[in-house]
Image (spheres, rainbow, N blue to C red):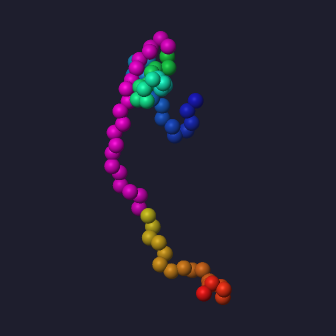
Amino acid sequence: MASEGVGLMRCLRCKSTLERSGKEPTRHVCSNPNCGQHYILQMQLVPVEAPRTTPLLEGSDAERSPGTE
């Protein structure tokens, strides 16, 4: 059972889920024993913009205690 927000890969032939074959890291096999379809997965790296960060505060709002000067 997949948790919320996690995608599943499905077989194009019978729509069953795909599982790792255990032989090669990129090879996946259909979980339906009657189908047996094999898939080789490829990964494509796509550049994305870095998340914008808020600028750091220039000064501190904290009060100084007498022992920290």
47 or 2: which is nearer to us? 47
In the rendered image, residue 57 lying in the magenta stretch gets the answer no
Task: Please state if 6 lies on the left or on the right of 52 as rendered.
Answer: right
Residue 18 seen by the camera? no
Question: Compared to 63, does 19 lie above or below?
Answer: above
The residue that appears at 48% across and 31% down in the rendered structure is 8
Question: Compared to 32, does 53 lie above or below?
Answer: below
Coordinates of residue 50 in the picture (x, y in percent): 38, 57
Coordinates of residue 38 in the picture (x, y in percent): 40, 20
Question: Compared to 63, does 13 lie above or below?
Answer: above
* Dominant SS type (magenta): loop
2 or 65: which is nearer to us? 65
The residue that appears at 52% across and 40% down in the rendered structure is 5
Task: Please state if 20 lies on the left or on the right of 49 as rendered.
Answer: right
The residue that appears at 37% across and 26% down in the rendered structure is 40
Query: Residue furthest toward the top?
Result: 34
Position of the N terminus, as image quadrant, is top right
Magenta stretch: give its range.
33-52
Residue 50 seen by the camera? yes
